[in-house]
Structure formats: C-alpha cells, structure tokens
Image (cartoon, rainbow, N blue to C red):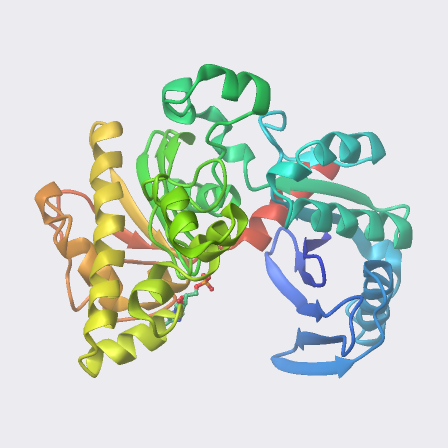
C-alpha cells in the first residue's frame, strides 16, 4: 500500500510517499514559494536530491506537478496506485480526539479552529482541498497535532483564570507535537513490549515540548493554548510572566501583537544568546567561550530538566525518559547537560553510550533509576500509519 504523508504550509507542501507495511520511503520532497515569485521544488529519490524551478500559482498546481514527478520517476505507473493521503493538521480544538477520514463537512468543522491556529490550519486545509481536486477518488485523512493531548484532565488543561474564559472563548491548554509524542510512545512501548509505561517524552528541536504519558494516555504536556508555552525553544520564550507584555508595551510603544511576535521569533536561544536560534551555532559559540551562548545553553537544559522533574512527580515516577527531534537526536552535549540536571531522580548518563547521532539507543548506565532513550521521531510515518488504518 502506498500512502502519501503531507504537511501543507501557506506557501509550501512537504510530502513523503511511504510503502506500508514495509515502511519504506519511496520518494520525498518539498514544494516552496507556492503562489510567489521564484517557486521551486526539491525531490529526494534513490539517494539523490534534485531541485527544479516551476511556476506554482497554487497548491493544486503543486499537487499536479507532484503526480507528474511520481509517474515520470516511475515511482507509480498510474494515480490509482496512491491508496491514501494523510494530512498533518495543526488544530482540531477539543472536538477531534482521533485522526479522521476527511470530507467537505469535516473540513468545515475543522475550519472552526482556524482562529486557534491561524498560521497553520487554513494552509493545512488548503492542502487537503488541493488533493481532493487533483485526486478526487483518493481518500484523505486528517492527523491533528492536538488529538493525542485530548486525554488530559481538567486539572491539567485548565488555566487558573476566570472560568468563563474557557466556557466562552475556549481558553485552555491544547498541546502540540502530539503526532511526534504518540510515535515515540508507540515505539518505546513496542520495543519494551509494555503498554503500561509511564513515559516522559521530550521533543527538543527548534520548537520543543515535553509530554507526560501514562499507558498511552497524555497526562500533561508543556505547550499550551498555543505553541509559545512551555520550555525555552529556538526562538520562542516558553513560559514567562504575562505581566511582562503590558510592561514592555509601555516601555517600547510596541503593540501586543508585536511583543507576541518578539516572544515567538526573537526569544529563546536566539534572544538570550544574541547569536542564533540554531543549536549548532550556539554550541560552536560556547566552545569559543561566548558567555551569552553559554548562558542560553544552560538555561535551555535547565528548563527541560525542570519540566522532567515536574512530570516525574505528576506520573508518580516515570519508567522511561525519551529524547527526540533535532537536539534530542543529534546533540550529545545537550543530552548530557539535561541528564546531569536530573541526577536527583537517579538518572545516570553513560558518556560512552551517549556518543552518537540520530539513532535509537539507550544512553544511561545500567543502574540509572530511570533509563533515558534517544528515539528518532517520524511524524510522517505516524500520519501514514493512521491513514492506512482509516482507509482500510
Ligand atoms: P528540528 O526542529 O527538530 O529540525 O531541530 C532543529 C534543531 O536541532 C536546531 O537547533 C539544530 O541546531 C539542532 N541540531 C540538528 N543537528 C544537530 C547536531 N548535529 N548537533 C547539535 N544540534 C543539532
């Protein structure tokens, strides 16, 4: 079975064609600058990466171009060979608790949550409609970033603010990165052959979130009403005192939207270091003794460690801690810094085991009270697996 896993942005379309059940990636790529000058697309196929310029006035043209490429490269012989398309959708509010087969009625229901994810949801939906137009006979499935977190209880998802904000305006914690956390739980629970695991899943990339999971159900997660909350990230502040916003508005004359933009795009590793949001640049600057980079690096590790300690308490003792995404998978330095800061939980990192990048491995000593695993995430595969299940 061939399933396309798709993530559509407002001017981009990322795709991976996956063969199931073998999980083989047949072809993948990215269409960029859709609807803009200089549009192009990159395709990874047979170990080679090629970029081509193309006029892409809208997402439907990009999807048509994608189908042409699949046939030209002989990945498929006809469009009938595409069994289903799975779409990443950012926000399903508190209505969608599972992935779902998409049709026009469902899309209209999802559109209700566009104001909660204004940068992503309209674009995700536009991507679905483009596939419905070009491949009218193929089933589409929506896989939401929010659904996995729908098992949180009121005590976790409510904010201690006037209750009518929740009732009237839907102000609550929704949580994000759910597809990644779900994939990580599935992977570790299959590996350890246990479905009753208490896991603290740490997705630490440019965006970052932690998730406390008990027996496959989310108990709490660090992102909130929006992906701005929780740990410090590449450019996002994570949790801060909200009183800072009106204070800086008065000091600088900026609007609330401008300050939120600063908190989303000019904070985190970038804001503290003044150098970059990219951890590789920060690590390089740390090696050269740059004090602000060293400060940013330490703050970053500490915020994650604090959340791990909090979730260990919430879970009444975790069985496993997992690290994933750009930093979790690749930065042995950051992994070590985090583990050193949770030594009070009995975590003992093994430096020799930690010396690698991008693989599934255990990085703690045998007598570590909680084992820490590095697990490469694979949201595309999770989307494809959900799609296979729903269309079968
Ligand atoms: P993601 O958003 O998951 O793609 O993660 C991006 C982050 O991972 C960036 O801050 C990168 O600097 C970081 N990253 C990727 N590869 C490495 C590496 N080899 N060493 C350190 N950090 C890395």
Q: Residue at x 51, y 16 (%)?
A: 164
Q: Along the horizontal axis of the image, is 132 left or right of 321?
A: right
User: Can you say whether 193 is above or below 359 in the image?
Assistant: above
Q: Position of residue 219 (x, y in %)?
A: 37, 28
Q: Number of labelled discs?
A: 0
Q: Along the horizontal axis of the image, is 108 left or right of 277?
A: right
Q: Position of residue 210 (x, y in %)?
A: 36, 44
Ligand 1's quadrant: bottom left
Q: Quadrant of residue 50?
A: bottom right
Q: Along the horizontal axis of the image, is 252 left or right of 77?
A: left
Q: Nearer the viewer, residue 267 or 218?
A: 267
Q: Residue at x 30, y 64 (%)?
A: 272
Query: Is residue 359 in view from this perspective?
Result: no
Q: Position of residue 42 (x, y in %)?
A: 69, 76
Q: Residue at x 83, y 47 (%)?
A: 129
Q: Quadrant of residue 275?
A: bottom left
Q: Nearer the viewer, residue 348 or 108?
A: 108
Query: Is residue 247 in view from this perspective?
Result: yes
User: Can you say whether 267 is above or below 43 in the image?
Assistant: above
Q: Quadrant of the C terminus?
A: top right
User: Can you say whether 190 is above or below 26 in the image?
Assistant: above
Q: Residue at x 76, y 52 (%)?
A: 127
Q: Position of residue 320 (x, y in %)?
A: 27, 42
Q: Along the horizontal axis of the image, is 311 left or right of 251?
A: left
């Amino acid at each position: 079975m061939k399933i396309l896993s798709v993530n559509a942005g407002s001017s981009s379309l990322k795709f991976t064609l996956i063969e199931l059940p073998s999980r083989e990636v047949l072809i993948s790529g990215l269409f960029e600058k859709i609807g803009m000058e200089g549009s192009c697309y990159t395709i990874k196929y047979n170990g080679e990466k090629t970029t081509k310029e193309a006029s892409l006035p809208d997402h439907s043209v990009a999807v048509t171009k994608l189908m042409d490429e699949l046939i030209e490269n002989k990945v498929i012989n006809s469009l009938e060979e595409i069994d289903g398309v799975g779409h990443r959708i950012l926000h399903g509010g508190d209505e969608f608790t599972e992935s779902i087969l998409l049709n026009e009625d469902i899309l209209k229901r999802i559109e209700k949550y566009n104001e909660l994810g204004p940068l992503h949801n309209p674009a995700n939906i536009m991507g679905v409609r483009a596939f419905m137009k070009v491949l009218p006979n193929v089933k589409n499935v929506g896989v939401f970033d929010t659904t996995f977190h729908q098992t949180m209880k009121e005590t976790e998802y409510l904010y201690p603010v006037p209750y009518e904000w929740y009732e009237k305006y839907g102000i609550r914690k929704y949580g994000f990165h759910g597809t990644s956390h779900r994939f990580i739980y599935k992977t570790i629970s299959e590996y350890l052959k246990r479905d009753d695991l208490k896991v603290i899943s740490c997705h630490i990339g440019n965006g970052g979130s932690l998730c406390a999971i008990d027996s496959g159900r989310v108990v709490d997660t660090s992102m909130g009403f929006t992906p701005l909350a929780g740990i410090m990230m590449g450019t996002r502040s994570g949790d801060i005192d909200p009183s800072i916003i009106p204070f800086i508005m008065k000091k600088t004359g900026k609007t609330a939207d401008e300050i939120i933009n600063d908190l989303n795009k000019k904070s985190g590793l970038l804001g503290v270091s003044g150098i970059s949001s990219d951890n590789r640049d920060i690590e390089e600057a740390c090696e050269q003794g740059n004090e602000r980079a060293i400060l940013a690096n330490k703050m970053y590790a500490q915020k994650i460690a604090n959340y791990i300690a909090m979730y260990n308490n919430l879970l009444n003792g975790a069985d496993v801690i997992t690290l994933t995404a750009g930093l979790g998978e690749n930065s042995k330095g950051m992994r070590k810094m985090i583990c050193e800061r949770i030594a009070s939980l009995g975590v003992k990192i093994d430096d020799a085991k930690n010396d690698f990048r991008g693989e599934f491995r255990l990085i703690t000593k045998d007598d570590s009270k909680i084992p820490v695993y590095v697990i490469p995430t694979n949201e595309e595969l999770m989307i494809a697996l959900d799609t296979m299940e729903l269309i079968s």
